[in-house]
Image (tube, rainbow, N blue to C red):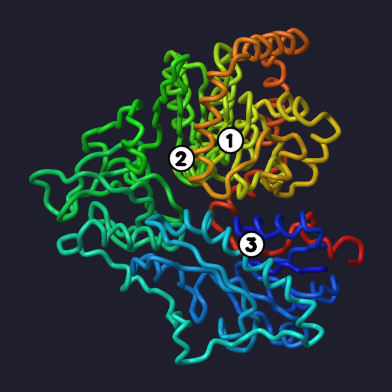
Amino acid sequence: MKILILTHSFNSLAQRLFEALSVRGHTLSVEFDIADAVTAEAVALFRPDLLLAPFLKRAIPAAVWSRLPCLIVHPGIVGDRGPSALDWAIQRGEAEWGVTVLQAEGELDAGPVWASAGFALRAATKSSLYRHEVGTAAVAAVLAALARFDDWQAGRWQPRRPRAGDPTVRGRLQPAMRQAERRIDWAADDTATILRRLRAADGFPGVADSLFGVPCRLFDAHPAPAEPGAAAGQLLARRDGAVLRATRDGAIWIGHVKRGDFKLPATVAFAAETAALPERPAPLLRGNDDGANDGAELRYRELATAQGAVGFLSFDFYNGAMSTAQCRRLVAAIAVARARPTRVLVLEGGADVWSNGIHLHRIEAAQLAGGSAADESWANINAINDVCLAILQTTDRLTIAALRGNAGAGGCFLALAADQVWAYEGVILNPHYRNMGNLYGSEYWTYLLPRRVGPAAAAAIMAARLPLGAPRAQQAGLIDACFGADRPAFEAEVARRAIALATAADYADRLAAKQARRAADEAIKPLAAYRDEELARMHRNFYGFDPSYHGARYHFVMKSPQSWTPRHLARHRHGGG
Protein backbone atom coordinates (compact mmCIF):
# COMPACT_ATOMS: atom_id res chain seq x y z
CA MET A 1 0.00 0.00 0.00
CA LYS A 2 0.95 3.66 -0.32
CA ILE A 3 0.73 5.18 3.13
CA LEU A 4 1.27 8.83 4.01
CA ILE A 5 2.42 9.26 7.62
CA LEU A 6 1.19 12.59 8.98
CA THR A 7 2.85 13.46 12.27
CA HIS A 8 3.70 16.44 14.44
CA SER A 9 7.31 15.20 14.55
CA PHE A 10 9.24 12.09 13.59
CA ASN A 11 9.25 10.84 17.19
CA SER A 12 9.97 7.35 18.53
CA LEU A 13 6.45 6.06 17.81
CA ALA A 14 6.40 7.46 14.26
CA GLN A 15 9.81 5.89 13.63
CA ARG A 16 8.77 2.53 15.00
CA LEU A 17 5.67 2.43 12.80
CA PHE A 18 7.68 3.66 9.81
CA GLU A 19 10.08 0.76 10.29
CA ALA A 20 7.34 -1.85 10.86
CA LEU A 21 5.54 -0.80 7.69
CA SER A 22 8.71 -0.46 5.61
CA VAL A 23 9.86 -4.02 6.26
CA ARG A 24 6.42 -5.27 5.21
CA GLY A 25 6.76 -3.74 1.78
CA HIS A 26 4.54 -0.67 2.05
CA THR A 27 5.53 2.49 0.20
CA LEU A 28 5.80 5.29 2.75
CA SER A 29 6.21 9.02 2.80
CA VAL A 30 6.16 11.39 5.75
CA GLU A 31 4.69 14.87 6.09
CA PHE A 32 4.96 16.98 9.22
CA ASP A 33 1.65 18.49 10.34
CA ILE A 34 2.46 22.13 9.66
CA ALA A 35 -0.72 23.52 8.12
CA ASP A 36 -3.92 22.22 6.54
CA ALA A 37 -2.84 23.39 3.09
CA VAL A 38 0.49 21.57 3.41
CA THR A 39 -1.29 18.34 4.39
CA ALA A 40 -3.66 18.64 1.46
CA GLU A 41 -0.74 19.29 -0.88
CA ALA A 42 1.08 16.18 0.42
CA VAL A 43 -1.99 14.05 -0.22
CA ALA A 44 -2.32 15.46 -3.74
CA LEU A 45 1.34 14.79 -4.52
CA PHE A 46 1.62 11.30 -3.03
CA ARG A 47 -1.92 10.04 -3.74
CA PRO A 48 -1.81 7.52 -0.88
CA ASP A 49 -4.22 4.65 -0.23
CA LEU A 50 -4.57 5.90 3.32
CA LEU A 51 -3.15 8.37 5.80
CA LEU A 52 -1.72 7.22 9.15
CA ALA A 53 -1.35 9.70 12.02
CA PRO A 54 0.76 8.39 14.93
CA PHE A 55 1.32 11.71 16.72
CA LEU A 56 -0.77 14.83 16.13
CA LYS A 57 -1.54 17.97 18.11
CA ARG A 58 -4.21 19.25 15.69
CA ALA A 59 -7.19 17.81 13.90
CA ILE A 60 -6.82 16.52 10.34
CA PRO A 61 -8.62 18.91 7.97
CA ALA A 62 -12.05 17.79 6.80
CA ALA A 63 -10.99 18.27 3.19
CA VAL A 64 -8.58 15.37 3.72
CA TRP A 65 -10.43 12.91 6.00
CA SER A 66 -13.67 13.25 4.02
CA ARG A 67 -11.93 12.00 0.84
CA LEU A 68 -9.23 9.67 2.17
CA PRO A 69 -9.30 7.07 4.97
CA CYS A 70 -7.27 8.58 7.80
CA LEU A 71 -6.30 6.33 10.73
CA ILE A 72 -5.41 7.92 14.06
CA VAL A 73 -3.16 6.07 16.53
CA HIS A 74 -4.56 7.00 19.94
CA PRO A 75 -2.67 5.97 23.13
CA GLY A 76 -5.83 4.99 24.97
CA ILE A 77 -8.28 2.16 25.34
CA VAL A 78 -11.40 1.84 23.17
CA GLY A 79 -13.76 4.71 23.94
CA ASP A 80 -11.05 6.88 25.46
CA ARG A 81 -10.95 10.40 24.06
CA GLY A 82 -8.81 13.45 24.70
CA PRO A 83 -5.18 14.57 24.42
CA SER A 84 -4.05 13.39 27.89
CA ALA A 85 -5.01 9.72 27.67
CA LEU A 86 -1.77 8.24 28.98
CA ASP A 87 -1.34 10.99 31.57
CA TRP A 88 -4.70 10.20 33.18
CA ALA A 89 -4.07 6.44 33.11
CA ILE A 90 -0.72 6.78 34.89
CA GLN A 91 -1.95 9.30 37.43
CA ARG A 92 -4.99 7.18 38.30
CA GLY A 93 -2.83 4.08 38.65
CA GLU A 94 -4.64 2.01 36.02
CA ALA A 95 -3.57 -1.63 35.89
CA GLU A 96 -4.14 -2.02 32.15
CA TRP A 97 -4.20 0.36 29.21
CA GLY A 98 -4.02 0.19 25.44
CA VAL A 99 -3.74 1.74 22.01
CA THR A 100 -6.68 2.26 19.65
CA VAL A 101 -6.57 2.86 15.90
CA LEU A 102 -9.64 4.83 14.83
CA GLN A 103 -10.82 6.63 11.75
CA ALA A 104 -10.68 10.42 11.68
CA GLU A 105 -13.97 12.28 11.60
CA GLY A 106 -15.22 15.69 12.59
CA GLU A 107 -15.15 14.96 16.33
CA LEU A 108 -11.72 14.24 17.81
CA ASP A 109 -11.03 10.60 18.79
CA ALA A 110 -14.69 9.74 18.23
CA GLY A 111 -14.46 7.89 14.92
CA PRO A 112 -15.10 4.19 14.33
CA VAL A 113 -12.49 1.77 15.68
CA TRP A 114 -10.38 -0.26 13.26
CA ALA A 115 -8.26 -2.13 15.82
CA SER A 116 -6.91 -1.99 19.37
CA ALA A 117 -4.25 -3.65 21.50
CA GLY A 118 -3.78 -3.69 25.27
CA PHE A 119 -0.90 -3.91 27.71
CA ALA A 120 -0.20 -4.02 31.44
CA LEU A 121 0.51 -0.53 32.74
CA ARG A 122 3.70 -0.88 34.77
CA ALA A 123 4.79 1.77 37.25
CA ALA A 124 6.93 3.92 34.96
CA THR A 125 7.16 7.34 33.37
CA LYS A 126 5.01 8.32 30.41
CA SER A 127 8.17 8.53 28.28
CA SER A 128 9.21 4.99 29.19
CA LEU A 129 5.77 3.53 28.53
CA TYR A 130 5.56 5.42 25.24
CA ARG A 131 8.90 4.02 24.06
CA HIS A 132 8.07 0.43 25.01
CA GLU A 133 4.51 -0.74 25.69
CA VAL A 134 2.72 1.95 23.68
CA GLY A 135 5.04 1.40 20.72
CA THR A 136 4.56 -2.37 20.75
CA ALA A 137 0.79 -2.09 21.07
CA ALA A 138 0.64 0.58 18.35
CA VAL A 139 2.49 -1.65 15.88
CA ALA A 140 0.15 -4.56 16.64
CA ALA A 141 -2.99 -2.42 16.32
CA VAL A 142 -1.87 -0.69 13.10
CA LEU A 143 -0.99 -3.99 11.44
CA ALA A 144 -4.35 -5.43 12.47
CA ALA A 145 -6.09 -2.38 11.00
CA LEU A 146 -4.22 -2.61 7.71
CA ALA A 147 -5.08 -6.30 7.43
CA ARG A 148 -8.75 -5.23 7.26
CA PHE A 149 -8.25 -2.56 4.61
CA ASP A 150 -9.10 -4.70 1.57
CA ASP A 151 -12.25 -6.04 3.22
CA TRP A 152 -13.24 -2.49 4.14
CA GLN A 153 -12.77 -1.29 0.57
CA ALA A 154 -14.83 -4.22 -0.74
CA GLY A 155 -17.59 -3.57 1.80
CA ARG A 156 -17.06 -6.91 3.57
CA TRP A 157 -16.11 -5.29 6.87
CA GLN A 158 -16.88 -2.04 8.66
CA PRO A 159 -15.17 -0.48 11.69
CA ARG A 160 -17.38 -0.26 14.77
CA ARG A 161 -18.12 2.93 16.64
CA PRO A 162 -17.98 2.60 20.48
CA ARG A 163 -21.52 2.66 21.84
CA ALA A 164 -22.63 4.28 25.06
CA GLY A 165 -23.62 1.67 27.62
CA ASP A 166 -21.49 -1.09 26.06
CA PRO A 167 -19.87 -2.81 29.10
CA THR A 168 -16.78 -3.72 27.04
CA VAL A 169 -16.03 -0.05 26.38
CA ARG A 170 -14.27 1.32 29.45
CA GLY A 171 -12.88 4.48 27.89
CA ARG A 172 -14.49 7.89 28.16
CA LEU A 173 -13.98 11.49 27.13
CA GLN A 174 -11.26 13.06 29.27
CA PRO A 175 -10.20 16.70 29.10
CA ALA A 176 -6.64 17.86 28.63
CA MET A 177 -4.95 17.48 32.01
CA ARG A 178 -4.22 20.87 33.54
CA GLN A 179 -1.52 21.75 36.02
CA ALA A 180 -4.24 21.99 38.67
CA GLU A 181 -4.79 18.23 38.34
CA ARG A 182 -1.04 17.60 38.43
CA ARG A 183 -0.30 19.78 41.46
CA ILE A 184 1.72 18.24 44.29
CA ASP A 185 0.90 18.95 47.92
CA TRP A 186 4.21 18.01 49.53
CA ALA A 187 2.75 18.12 53.04
CA ALA A 188 -0.27 15.93 52.30
CA ASP A 189 0.56 13.66 49.34
CA ASP A 190 2.38 10.39 49.90
CA THR A 191 5.36 9.24 47.84
CA ALA A 192 3.30 6.96 45.60
CA THR A 193 0.91 9.80 44.69
CA ILE A 194 3.74 12.23 43.97
CA LEU A 195 5.55 9.67 41.81
CA ARG A 196 2.42 9.03 39.76
CA ARG A 197 1.94 12.75 39.15
CA LEU A 198 5.55 13.27 38.13
CA ARG A 199 5.64 10.14 35.96
CA ALA A 200 2.41 11.14 34.21
CA ALA A 201 3.96 14.49 33.24
CA ASP A 202 7.43 13.24 32.33
CA GLY A 203 8.66 14.21 28.90
CA PHE A 204 5.96 16.86 28.62
CA PRO A 205 4.71 19.09 30.25
CA GLY A 206 6.28 18.40 33.65
CA VAL A 207 4.69 19.32 36.99
CA ALA A 208 4.55 23.02 37.85
CA ASP A 209 6.17 23.52 41.25
CA SER A 210 9.02 25.53 42.76
CA LEU A 211 12.52 24.96 44.05
CA PHE A 212 14.22 27.48 46.32
CA GLY A 213 11.15 29.68 45.88
CA VAL A 214 11.60 29.85 42.10
CA PRO A 215 8.80 28.53 39.81
CA CYS A 216 9.87 25.63 37.62
CA ARG A 217 8.62 22.32 36.23
CA LEU A 218 9.77 18.99 37.59
CA PHE A 219 10.75 15.84 35.64
CA ASP A 220 12.67 12.60 36.04
CA ALA A 221 11.61 11.34 39.48
CA HIS A 222 12.85 8.27 41.35
CA PRO A 223 11.92 6.97 44.82
CA ALA A 224 14.31 7.04 47.78
CA PRO A 225 14.13 5.80 51.38
CA ALA A 226 12.61 8.00 54.06
CA GLU A 227 14.88 10.55 55.75
CA PRO A 228 14.39 10.57 59.56
CA GLY A 229 13.48 14.01 60.83
CA ALA A 230 13.11 15.58 57.36
CA ALA A 231 10.14 17.87 56.78
CA ALA A 232 7.96 17.15 53.76
CA GLY A 233 9.15 19.22 50.81
CA GLN A 234 12.61 19.80 52.29
CA LEU A 235 15.61 19.58 49.94
CA LEU A 236 18.17 17.24 51.44
CA ALA A 237 21.03 16.33 49.10
CA ARG A 238 22.32 16.26 45.51
CA ARG A 239 23.69 13.53 43.24
CA ASP A 240 24.37 13.14 39.52
CA GLY A 241 22.56 16.40 38.78
CA ALA A 242 19.51 15.43 40.85
CA VAL A 243 18.21 16.81 44.15
CA LEU A 244 16.66 14.77 46.95
CA ARG A 245 13.36 16.07 48.28
CA ALA A 246 11.55 14.68 51.30
CA THR A 247 7.93 13.55 51.20
CA ARG A 248 5.69 12.89 54.17
CA ASP A 249 6.50 9.16 54.06
CA GLY A 250 9.74 8.93 52.07
CA ALA A 251 11.81 10.91 49.60
CA ILE A 252 12.18 11.45 45.85
CA TRP A 253 15.14 12.22 43.64
CA ILE A 254 14.22 14.92 41.10
CA GLY A 255 16.62 14.67 38.20
CA HIS A 256 15.60 17.43 35.80
CA VAL A 257 13.74 20.73 35.91
CA LYS A 258 12.63 23.33 33.43
CA ARG A 259 13.49 26.69 34.93
CA GLY A 260 13.84 28.62 31.71
CA ASP A 261 13.29 27.56 28.14
CA PHE A 262 14.35 23.90 28.35
CA LYS A 263 15.07 21.01 30.69
CA LEU A 264 18.36 20.74 32.53
CA PRO A 265 19.65 18.69 35.47
CA ALA A 266 18.32 20.19 38.68
CA THR A 267 21.78 21.05 39.99
CA VAL A 268 22.64 22.80 36.72
CA ALA A 269 19.43 24.83 36.55
CA PHE A 270 19.88 25.75 40.23
CA ALA A 271 23.66 25.65 40.42
CA ALA A 272 24.14 28.36 43.04
CA GLU A 273 21.22 27.24 45.18
CA THR A 274 22.14 23.54 45.26
CA ALA A 275 25.85 24.09 45.94
CA ALA A 276 25.21 24.08 49.69
CA LEU A 277 23.40 20.72 49.63
CA PRO A 278 25.52 17.76 50.73
CA GLU A 279 26.74 15.46 47.96
CA ARG A 280 25.40 11.94 48.36
CA PRO A 281 26.86 9.74 45.61
CA ALA A 282 25.53 6.26 45.02
CA PRO A 283 28.11 3.45 45.15
CA LEU A 284 28.95 2.17 41.69
CA LEU A 285 28.96 -1.47 42.78
CA ARG A 286 25.46 -2.37 43.88
CA GLY A 287 23.77 -5.75 44.23
CA ASN A 288 21.77 -7.45 41.51
CA ASP A 289 18.49 -6.28 43.04
CA ASP A 290 19.66 -3.01 44.59
CA GLY A 291 19.31 0.35 42.95
CA ALA A 292 17.57 -0.70 39.75
CA ASN A 293 15.29 2.37 39.98
CA ASP A 294 17.09 4.66 42.39
CA GLY A 295 17.85 7.31 39.78
CA ALA A 296 21.64 7.00 40.05
CA GLU A 297 23.14 7.25 36.58
CA LEU A 298 25.84 4.58 36.90
CA ARG A 299 25.53 1.06 38.28
CA TYR A 300 27.79 -1.99 38.16
CA ARG A 301 26.88 -5.53 39.17
CA GLU A 302 28.19 -9.03 38.55
CA LEU A 303 26.96 -12.56 37.97
CA ALA A 304 29.45 -15.20 39.05
CA THR A 305 30.14 -18.47 37.23
CA ALA A 306 32.55 -21.30 37.99
CA GLN A 307 34.86 -20.18 35.18
CA GLY A 308 34.61 -16.45 35.84
CA ALA A 309 32.21 -13.57 36.38
CA VAL A 310 30.16 -11.44 33.98
CA GLY A 311 30.03 -7.72 34.71
CA PHE A 312 27.09 -5.47 33.85
CA LEU A 313 27.62 -1.71 33.63
CA SER A 314 24.55 0.48 33.09
CA PHE A 315 24.71 4.19 32.32
CA ASP A 316 21.18 5.52 32.53
CA PHE A 317 21.46 9.12 31.36
CA TYR A 318 18.16 10.99 30.95
CA ASN A 319 16.92 10.64 27.34
CA GLY A 320 20.27 9.09 26.46
CA ALA A 321 22.09 12.44 26.30
CA MET A 322 25.70 12.29 27.54
CA SER A 323 27.31 15.53 28.75
CA THR A 324 31.03 16.11 29.08
CA ALA A 325 30.94 15.43 32.83
CA GLN A 326 28.79 12.32 32.40
CA CYS A 327 31.18 10.92 29.79
CA ARG A 328 34.10 11.45 32.14
CA ARG A 329 32.28 9.67 34.96
CA LEU A 330 31.51 6.81 32.58
CA VAL A 331 35.17 6.50 31.58
CA ALA A 332 36.03 6.20 35.28
CA ALA A 333 33.30 3.57 35.75
CA ILE A 334 34.64 1.54 32.81
CA ALA A 335 38.06 1.63 34.47
CA VAL A 336 36.53 0.22 37.65
CA ALA A 337 34.76 -2.49 35.65
CA ARG A 338 38.01 -3.37 33.86
CA ALA A 339 39.73 -3.84 37.21
CA ARG A 340 37.21 -6.49 38.20
CA PRO A 341 37.99 -10.20 37.54
CA THR A 342 35.40 -10.77 34.80
CA ARG A 343 35.57 -12.56 31.47
CA VAL A 344 32.70 -10.63 29.83
CA LEU A 345 31.62 -7.00 30.33
CA VAL A 346 28.04 -6.14 29.31
CA LEU A 347 27.42 -2.44 28.63
CA GLU A 348 23.69 -1.97 29.28
CA GLY A 349 23.29 1.74 28.60
CA GLY A 350 19.99 3.10 29.88
CA ALA A 351 16.79 1.21 30.52
CA ASP A 352 14.83 3.27 27.99
CA VAL A 353 17.53 4.76 25.74
CA TRP A 354 20.93 3.16 25.22
CA SER A 355 22.59 6.43 24.22
CA ASN A 356 21.86 9.37 21.93
CA GLY A 357 25.34 10.86 21.90
CA ILE A 358 26.40 14.34 23.01
CA HIS A 359 24.21 16.47 25.27
CA LEU A 360 22.71 19.21 23.10
CA HIS A 361 20.79 20.79 25.99
CA ARG A 362 23.95 21.24 28.06
CA ILE A 363 25.72 22.71 25.05
CA GLU A 364 22.89 25.20 24.47
CA ALA A 365 22.90 26.05 28.18
CA ALA A 366 26.60 26.91 27.96
CA GLN A 367 25.81 29.31 25.11
CA LEU A 368 22.95 30.98 26.99
CA ALA A 369 25.11 31.36 30.09
CA GLY A 370 27.56 33.49 28.13
CA GLY A 371 29.99 30.73 27.26
CA SER A 372 30.80 29.14 23.94
CA ALA A 373 28.59 26.46 22.40
CA ALA A 374 31.47 25.58 20.09
CA ASP A 375 33.85 25.07 23.03
CA GLU A 376 31.34 22.93 24.94
CA SER A 377 30.58 20.92 21.79
CA TRP A 378 34.31 20.30 21.34
CA ALA A 379 34.75 19.21 24.97
CA ASN A 380 31.69 16.97 24.74
CA ILE A 381 32.69 15.19 21.53
CA ASN A 382 36.17 14.56 22.89
CA ALA A 383 34.74 13.21 26.13
CA ILE A 384 32.42 10.75 24.37
CA ASN A 385 35.31 9.74 22.12
CA ASP A 386 37.20 8.87 25.29
CA VAL A 387 34.32 6.57 26.30
CA CYS A 388 34.45 4.87 22.92
CA LEU A 389 38.22 4.51 23.15
CA ALA A 390 37.96 2.96 26.63
CA ILE A 391 35.65 0.28 25.20
CA LEU A 392 37.88 -0.36 22.18
CA GLN A 393 40.92 -0.69 24.43
CA THR A 394 39.24 -3.25 26.69
CA THR A 395 41.09 -6.13 25.05
CA ASP A 396 41.51 -8.40 28.09
CA ARG A 397 37.88 -9.58 28.05
CA LEU A 398 34.93 -9.74 25.69
CA THR A 399 32.52 -6.81 25.58
CA ILE A 400 28.83 -6.71 24.71
CA ALA A 401 26.62 -3.69 24.04
CA ALA A 402 23.14 -4.75 25.14
CA LEU A 403 20.63 -2.26 23.72
CA ARG A 404 17.57 -2.24 25.98
CA GLY A 405 16.37 0.95 24.31
CA ASN A 406 16.85 3.04 21.20
CA ALA A 407 20.20 4.46 20.14
CA GLY A 408 20.89 7.44 17.94
CA ALA A 409 23.78 9.37 16.38
CA GLY A 410 26.95 8.96 18.43
CA GLY A 411 25.18 6.51 20.72
CA CYS A 412 24.90 4.02 17.84
CA PHE A 413 28.59 4.11 17.12
CA LEU A 414 29.44 3.95 20.80
CA ALA A 415 27.63 0.59 20.83
CA LEU A 416 29.62 -0.59 17.81
CA ALA A 417 32.81 -0.23 19.84
CA ALA A 418 31.86 -3.43 21.70
CA ASP A 419 32.74 -6.87 20.33
CA GLN A 420 29.09 -7.91 20.15
CA VAL A 421 25.98 -5.70 19.79
CA TRP A 422 22.65 -7.18 20.87
CA ALA A 423 19.24 -5.48 20.84
CA TYR A 424 15.66 -6.43 21.52
CA GLU A 425 13.16 -6.53 18.68
CA GLY A 426 11.54 -3.16 19.37
CA VAL A 427 14.76 -1.12 19.37
CA ILE A 428 15.19 1.59 16.74
CA LEU A 429 18.65 2.78 15.70
CA ASN A 430 19.48 6.04 13.94
CA PRO A 431 23.11 5.56 12.81
CA HIS A 432 23.68 8.97 11.26
CA TYR A 433 24.45 12.58 12.20
CA ARG A 434 23.48 14.80 9.27
CA ASN A 435 20.01 15.63 10.55
CA MET A 436 21.69 17.79 13.18
CA GLY A 437 22.78 20.51 10.80
CA ASN A 438 25.03 18.38 8.57
CA LEU A 439 27.10 17.28 11.55
CA TYR A 440 29.91 14.98 10.41
CA GLY A 441 30.17 12.92 13.59
CA SER A 442 32.98 11.22 15.44
CA GLU A 443 33.02 8.33 17.99
CA TYR A 444 35.39 6.49 15.60
CA TRP A 445 32.49 5.81 13.23
CA THR A 446 34.74 5.90 10.17
CA TYR A 447 36.49 2.86 11.64
CA LEU A 448 33.59 1.07 13.33
CA LEU A 449 30.86 1.26 10.69
CA PRO A 450 32.82 0.11 7.59
CA ARG A 451 34.41 -2.61 9.73
CA ARG A 452 30.95 -4.10 10.23
CA VAL A 453 29.09 -3.50 6.97
CA GLY A 454 31.74 -2.52 4.42
CA PRO A 455 32.48 0.92 2.92
CA ALA A 456 29.62 0.99 0.38
CA ALA A 457 26.94 -0.04 2.88
CA ALA A 458 28.38 2.38 5.44
CA ALA A 459 28.09 5.26 2.99
CA ALA A 460 24.50 4.25 2.13
CA ILE A 461 23.47 4.08 5.81
CA MET A 462 24.92 7.50 6.56
CA ALA A 463 23.34 9.07 3.48
CA ALA A 464 19.86 7.58 4.01
CA ARG A 465 19.38 9.21 7.43
CA LEU A 466 16.49 6.81 8.17
CA PRO A 467 15.74 4.73 11.25
CA LEU A 468 16.66 1.06 11.32
CA GLY A 469 14.76 -1.48 13.39
CA ALA A 470 16.85 -4.04 15.24
CA PRO A 471 15.84 -7.00 12.98
CA ARG A 472 16.84 -5.08 9.84
CA ALA A 473 20.00 -3.80 11.54
CA GLN A 474 20.98 -7.42 12.20
CA GLN A 475 20.33 -8.37 8.59
CA ALA A 476 22.56 -5.50 7.47
CA GLY A 477 25.36 -6.64 9.79
CA LEU A 478 25.15 -3.48 11.88
CA ILE A 479 24.38 -5.49 15.02
CA ASP A 480 25.05 -9.14 15.84
CA ALA A 481 21.84 -10.39 17.42
CA CYS A 482 18.21 -9.39 17.89
CA PHE A 483 16.01 -11.26 20.35
CA GLY A 484 13.33 -10.80 22.99
CA ALA A 485 9.84 -9.48 22.38
CA ASP A 486 10.20 -6.90 25.16
CA ARG A 487 12.81 -5.47 27.49
CA PRO A 488 12.39 -7.95 30.40
CA ALA A 489 12.67 -10.93 28.06
CA PHE A 490 15.71 -9.35 26.41
CA GLU A 491 17.45 -8.68 29.73
CA ALA A 492 16.96 -12.26 30.88
CA GLU A 493 18.31 -13.64 27.63
CA VAL A 494 21.28 -11.24 27.68
CA ALA A 495 22.30 -12.61 31.08
CA ARG A 496 21.97 -16.20 29.86
CA ARG A 497 23.95 -15.57 26.66
CA ALA A 498 26.64 -13.55 28.43
CA ILE A 499 27.20 -16.36 30.94
CA ALA A 500 27.32 -18.88 28.10
CA LEU A 501 29.93 -16.74 26.36
CA ALA A 502 32.02 -16.45 29.53
CA THR A 503 31.95 -20.22 30.09
CA ALA A 504 32.31 -21.34 26.48
CA ALA A 505 35.06 -23.82 25.67
CA ASP A 506 36.37 -21.54 22.93
CA TYR A 507 36.50 -18.41 25.13
CA ALA A 508 40.31 -18.20 24.99
CA ASP A 509 40.28 -18.54 21.21
CA ARG A 510 37.66 -15.80 20.86
CA LEU A 511 39.65 -13.47 23.07
CA ALA A 512 42.88 -14.17 21.20
CA ALA A 513 41.17 -13.53 17.85
CA LYS A 514 39.82 -10.22 19.16
CA GLN A 515 43.28 -9.12 20.33
CA ALA A 516 44.89 -10.14 17.04
CA ARG A 517 42.33 -8.24 14.98
CA ARG A 518 42.71 -5.10 17.08
CA ALA A 519 46.49 -5.26 16.73
CA ALA A 520 46.25 -5.80 12.97
CA ASP A 521 43.79 -2.92 12.55
CA GLU A 522 46.01 -0.64 14.62
CA ALA A 523 49.00 -1.50 12.45
CA ILE A 524 47.10 -0.62 9.29
CA LYS A 525 45.70 2.64 10.65
CA PRO A 526 45.86 3.74 14.30
CA LEU A 527 42.70 4.71 16.15
CA ALA A 528 44.28 8.11 16.76
CA ALA A 529 44.31 8.74 13.01
CA TYR A 530 40.58 8.03 12.66
CA ARG A 531 39.88 10.32 15.59
CA ASP A 532 42.02 13.15 14.25
CA GLU A 533 40.37 12.97 10.82
CA GLU A 534 36.86 12.97 12.28
CA LEU A 535 37.61 15.80 14.69
CA ALA A 536 39.05 17.92 11.88
CA ARG A 537 35.62 17.76 10.22
CA MET A 538 33.83 18.33 13.54
CA HIS A 539 35.99 21.39 14.21
CA ARG A 540 34.60 22.93 11.03
CA ASN A 541 31.05 22.06 12.17
CA PHE A 542 31.62 23.77 15.52
CA TYR A 543 33.90 26.69 14.60
CA GLY A 544 33.55 27.07 10.82
CA PHE A 545 31.63 29.55 8.70
CA ASP A 546 28.57 27.28 8.25
CA PRO A 547 26.20 27.79 11.22
CA SER A 548 23.94 24.85 10.30
CA TYR A 549 24.81 22.75 13.36
CA HIS A 550 24.30 25.63 15.79
CA GLY A 551 20.95 26.52 14.22
CA ALA A 552 19.73 22.93 14.17
CA ARG A 553 20.80 22.42 17.78
CA TYR A 554 19.00 25.58 18.91
CA HIS A 555 15.75 24.58 17.21
CA PHE A 556 16.00 21.02 18.55
CA VAL A 557 16.51 22.16 22.14
CA MET A 558 13.88 24.90 21.97
CA LYS A 559 11.41 22.53 20.26
CA SER A 560 10.75 25.10 17.56
CA PRO A 561 7.69 24.36 15.41
CA GLN A 562 8.48 22.51 12.20
CA SER A 563 8.50 24.75 9.15
CA TRP A 564 9.08 22.02 6.54
CA THR A 565 9.48 18.27 6.24
CA PRO A 566 13.03 17.02 5.52
CA ARG A 567 13.20 15.73 1.97
CA HIS A 568 14.65 12.35 2.96
CA LEU A 569 11.32 11.70 4.73
CA ALA A 570 8.96 13.45 2.27
CA ARG A 571 9.37 11.18 -0.73
CA HIS A 572 6.36 12.79 -2.38
CA ARG A 573 8.34 16.02 -2.75
CA HIS A 574 11.13 14.43 -4.79
CA GLY A 575 10.87 15.90 -8.25
CA GLY A 576 7.12 16.02 -8.58
CA GLY A 577 6.00 13.22 -6.30
In the rendered image, the vertical position of residue 300 relative to residue 177, given as above or below: above
Image location (x, y in percent) of residue 423 = 60, 40
Image location (x, y in percent) of residue 54 = 63, 67
Quarter of the rendering containing residue 284: top left
Between disc 2 and disc 3, the foreground one is: 3
Q: Which of the marked residues, 1 or 2, is nearer the chain's N terminus?
A: 2
Between disc 1 and disc 2, the foreground one is: 2
Front-most of residues 535 and 575: 575
Tell me the kind of residue under disc 1.
Ala
Is label 2 in contact with label 3 (beta carbons under 8 Å)?
no
Which secondary structure lies at badge 2?
loop
Please name the residue that numbered disc 2 is placed on.
317
Which secondary structure lies at badge 3?
helix
Q: CA distance from mark 1 to mark 3?
A: 40 Å
**Local crowd at mark 2 within 10 Å, few (<14), some, or many (≥20)?**
many
Horizontal side, residue 310 vs residue 36: left or right: left
Residue for point 67% across, 60% down: 17
Which dot marks residue 374? 1
**Local crowd at mark 1 within 10 Å, few (<14), some, or many (≥20)?**
many
Which dot marks residue 519? none
**Local crowd at mark 3 within 10 Å, few (<14), some, or many (≥20)?**
many
User: Does residue 259 appear in this view?
Assistant: no
Please name the residue that numbered disc 3 is placed on.
139
Horizontal side, residue 84 vs residue 108: left or right: left
